[in-house]
Structure formats: structure tokens, C-alpha cells
Image (cartoon, grey):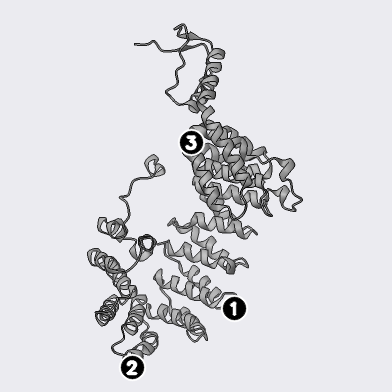
Amino acid sequence: MRRLLTIRCRRPAAIAAAMLLIGPGAALAEPGGSQDVSLERLLMRLRRTADEHLAPMRKTVEKAVVELERLEPPRAEAARIQRQRLIDLGPSAAPLLVPWLEPDRARTRREDPDQDQGGLAGDLTPEAFRAQQFALALRELPNPAVTDRLLVLARHGTPEARNNALVALSTSSEPARVQAVVHEIYATAEGALRRRALDTLKTLGGPRDVFIEALAKDDDELIEVALSALTGHDNPTYTPPVIVLLQSTHGPRHVQSILRYFRQSTAKLDEDSVKAVIGVLLTNRLRPEDKAGLLDTLSRLDVRLDPPLKKRLDPLANSSSEEVSEATLILLARQRDSRARRQLLEPYDNAIERSKNRPNVYSRRAEIHYRVRDLRSAIKDYKRAVELARGNRVDEVPLLGLARCFALQGKFKDAATYLERAPISVATLHELATDPDFAEMVQDKIGRAAFRLPEEKPSRNQRSR
């Protein structure tokens, strides 16, 4: 057996970094067979071997530089092809890509009021566009050998280069080390660079208190990043800051993201939060469709309303907006308010009386039953709609409605049967799999098969916990 290589040095980090560039299969033995070498000679050999390993890749990289810089808009698809060629080189090519994250400032500098704050406003020059595409490629090629270079660039490069380095660092295999530097950049930067730093922290799984604090900033794009980072985490401590945001002057501009946050949360709203939401609904600051969305969210979260709170909803129940009025009556009906239920169903009952053989009128009433969670009545009306459509192409609405109702009842086989019958694409199935109504079903083997989802494998973060 060949004796282990002896290195007269107590600094193995330099050797390890070079080995990361060339991989474990490199031949490093002395030409004369000597196994005892100095650090200097070993490093020289490592550099030579690395250069030989990277030489064929340089041509691909240099060609990509030329091709990307000569592209004319629209250039998204052509850029994607060039990016993929870089990604296909593998992580060992990452050192060749890093220098191209920095555009040539002599050619790309612009008089831009946001430039000093890390802004990238205005149309990208060819060189800046190339640098951006290299950053996107590096994001797919995490390699610890370039982490230090990327961190230096993120701290001290030009605004474009700092932004690009943060993009590349977002998938680092050393998240804890990178997070510390990125958090420092977030705390000191402004404008677009600060938003990019927060987005990188989001991807790296940064501390949640950073995102909670960002909700109070006077920066709509920063707020959007923060809401996205908090969405999908069932931590009740996140909800009060989100409610405060809804009440703020920024709130109306972020209603859709706030709705997304609540739709993916199973946390219950406390009484103060419910009162705060209703207070916002009674103002004129929101569009009717946003008010309806918030009312539906209160219904989905199954909040409990005391008599004074129900009384405060009267103006919304009598709103000139049919969408707002219906959403309010549904919320009240879910509080077992029989008068609201009758008022809600009356127009649909009358429509069925006038057109008993039309499938769509049953589907519409079934939708109301489903929204007030009278699942038995909803199933009955959806099935009637399917029966009346027999002989014709059955619309997806009653079939998906039946799937939802059975999924909520825990009858996953029945739900899967109707999903299979629905004339929808696999892409739509995957989208439906994220719907809260199917949350329990997708955890079941039957559900994953019905939605054409792969078997769940633990993520790297889950395995490390």
C-alpha cells in the first residue's frame, strides 16, 4: 500500500481549498516517487493540476461571455441556454465564473440616483446582463472553494457585483458562515442591495426576527420579501406583526401577500387580531376583492365572533359589492347564523327552481354549501350537477368540488377518484396540492399518488436537525 503523503506544514486549509477545485482523483505524486514534499512544491503542483483540469472549461466560459454580451432583447431563452451550458460544467467550474460577476465599470457605470445604495435601476448593459446570468449559474453550482471570494465580492465589489455575489451565495453549502456576513450587509446597505441581502437570508433560512423587523420598514419590496419568508411557518408570534402591517399605510399594497400568509397558516387568530382585521375591513382603504379575500380568510381560519363583533359586520353584509356581501354572509353562516344562511342561499334556491335541469346552478349552490362547510349538502349538489351533465363533457368544477369535500372529510380514496376524473393538467394538480383543503390528503400515500407527487424525501435541512 502506498504510504501517505507527508506535508511539512500545519496549515492544511490551503491544501483543502486547492483540492476542492480539482476533485479527489488528481495525481499528485512526485515524478521520482518521493512521498515527502514541501508545502510550496505541493501547492505548485496543485495549481498546475487545477489549471490543467480547468483549461477545457475556460473556452466554454469565455464563449458564454461573448454570447451573453451580444444578445439583443428579448433574450431570456437564449440566456437560459447559455446558463445551462455553464451549469453543465459542474461545481468545479465555479472559480472560473466568479470573476465575471463584476461588470467592467468603465463600460457600465451610469448616472443613477440609486447607484450608491446598491441600486440596479435602468436597463442592464450587455456586461451587467452577462454578470447577472453568471450569478444565476453560480447559484446552481454551490462550491465551498469560492465562498471566501464571493463573500469578499459581496462586501467590497461594485453595486452590481455585490448584488450578483449575494445571488450566488443564496445556495451556499456553508449557510451559517454566509448568513453572518449577509446579515451584516443587510444591516448596513440600503435600497436594492438591502433587499437582495434579505432575499438571500430568506433562501438560506436566516433568523425569523430579521424578517419580522423588516415588516415595519418603509420599503414595499423589502416587506414583500419578509412576508414571503414568514409564509408557511406556523408560528403564532408572526401573526401580530402581520396584522400591524395590515393596519398600516403600507397594508393595502400587500393584501395579496398577507392573504397568502394566512392561507398557508393553521395558527388561530386571537380575539384582538380578529377585531383588528374587522377594523381594517370597515375602512375604505381596501378594494372590494381584497375585503372579500380577508373575509374568506376569517372563515377559513374558523374564527369565533361574539355578538358585538357580528353586529359590526352589518355594513359589510349590506355592502353594494356583491362579492363583499356574500363573503360576509358566509362568515356569519359559519357562526351558525341561520338568518345569514337563508339570505345567502335564497338566490341560489330560486335559480334552481327556475332551472332544475341545468348543472351549473347546482354547482353554484354547492359552492356556497362548501364555503359554509356544510359538506353533506355540497356533495349532494355537486353530484346532482355531475348527473345532469351525463352524456356531455362534465365540467371540472363539480368534480373538483367533490374532491375538496371528500378530502376535508378524510375520505381520500373518494377524493382521488374525482381528481382523476377532472379534465385538468398535471400542472394544475400540482397547484391544487398546495391548497389548504388538501393539506392532510397530500400527506397520505393515496393523496400523493392522486396529485402525481414524488415520494417525500427529507431535505438537507431536515436531515441536519
Question: Number of numbered discs present?
Answer: 3
Label 3 crowd (10 A; few <14 / some 14-19 / many >=20): some
- For this view, does 245 lie left or right of residue 188? left
Mark nearer the viewer, 3 or 2: 3
Q: Earlier in the sequence, mark 3 or mark 1?
A: 3
Label 1 crowd (10 A; few <14 / some 14-19 / many >=20): few
In the rendered image, residue 58, in percent from the top left (x then y), is placed at 56, 32
Q: Is residue 22 visible?
A: yes
Mark nearer the viewer, 3 or 1: 3
- Label number found at residue 354: 2
- For this view, does 239 lie left or right of residue 72? left
Residue 147 in the image: above or below residue 275: above
Residue at screen point 55% across, 53% down: 76
Secondary element at image label 3: loop
Residue 320 in the image: above or below residue 27: below
Q: Amino acid at mark 3?
A: Leu
Front in this rendered view, residue 176 or 79: 79
Q: Earlier in the sequence, mark 3 or mark 2?
A: 3
In the rendered image, residue 40, in percent from the top left (x then y), is placed at 57, 14
Residue at screen point 61% across, 54% down: 73
- Label number found at residue 284: 1
Q: Earlier in the sequence, mark 1 or mark 2?
A: 1
- Label number found at residue 89: 3
Check whether the beta carbons of the residues at disc 3 and disc 2 lie within 8 A of each other.
no
Q: CA distance from mark 3 to mark 1?
A: 56 Å
Q: Amino acid at mark 1?
A: Asn
